[in-house]
Amino acid sequence: MKNIMMAGLVGLFLVFQGCKSTKYEAMFENTEPKLISDQFKFTEGPATDKSGNVYFTDQPNDKIYVWDWKTDKIELFSDKTGRANGTYFDENDYLITCSDNEGEIWKIGKDKSVEVLSKGFEGRRLNGPNDLWLDGNGGIYFTDPLYERDYWENFKVEIPEKNLYYRNKDGKILKLETFVQPNGIIGSISQKKLYVSDIDAGKTYVYDILGDGKLSEKKLFCEMGSDGMTLDKEGNLYITGDGVTVFNSRGEKVHHVKIPEDWTGNITFGGEKNNILFITASKSVYTLPTKTSAMK
């Protein structure tokens, strides 16, 4: 009887696992990543505006492009970006960028006007802001690793640590934590969770957000680092590097999307219903329709 019960439990577990796997596979059923363009040097920083169009960077070439979901076409938006890396739209549809050429955070209008929001930390140049997420209170969480670019001129390290920072609505910057090499970052729409990748450590962490720039102790979310990340409405976390890997809210790997490029840099949801994954990968950008949608 004991053996029969054990066999039954194992069977139920396998059925549950199979159902779980099927559930996530169904989110991408009958779809494959679609190459939109491979004309770039290295794509990064996708962000979706209020219309569902996705802006992304070709960082080495100092350009920002926009993908129009209605036409499925790409057009140049700006060729003066401060060599922007990660980007995110604020509530007024201004594009906030990690413009790492001078170690700054920029605010770019649809008219291409530029306002520098942050020039450094405590009078010292930031290494090169990499990725950022805006909370709902006017604050900006951003990562500042160190990837010395061959196009930087007269660069000198002024902050030896690689840190996570918070810029509050009044412009004050707080140092929150030091990592091996912080990179991708995203927060939940509920403003309760913040995910940060320590890419060189091969880990992604999660924090509880306790207030503006106030975080709990970090907890290990998964044993995988990430270049960029996004969340869907079910709380699944999508992280990039070797293609796109999907983790559920418990940090369990549930799906993988293969991208035919050497490196997958970043990801977001776009389109009319925010249900199309827009993926930046090396010299290319791809789209992938899903049966889920962005967290907002």
Image: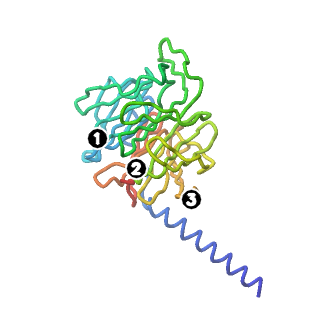
What residue lies at 57% left-to-right and 55% top-to-bottom? 251
Image check: 210 left or right of 137? right
Rounded to the nearest angstrom, the CA distance separating label 1 from label 3 is 37 Å
Residue 250 got which mark?
Answer: 3
Rendering coords of residue 5 (x, y %): 72, 83
Residue under label 2:
277
**What amino acid type is highlighted by mark number 1?**
Lys
- Which of the two labelled residues, at mark 2 and mark 3, occupies the earlier sequence position? 3
Rendering coords of residue 126 (x, y %): 49, 24
Please tell me whether mark 3 sits on a helix, a strand or a loop.
loop
**What amino acid type is highlighted by mark number 2?**
Leu
Please tell me whether mark 2 sits on a helix, a strand or a loop.
strand
Rendering coords of residue 138 (x, y %): 35, 40
Rounded to the nearest angstrom, the CA distance separating label 2 from label 1 is 15 Å
Residue under label 1:
73
Rendering coords of residue 84 (x, y %): 40, 28
Residue 89 got which mark?
Answer: none
Q: How crowded is mark 1: few (under 14 residues within 10 Å), some or many (20 or more)?
A: few
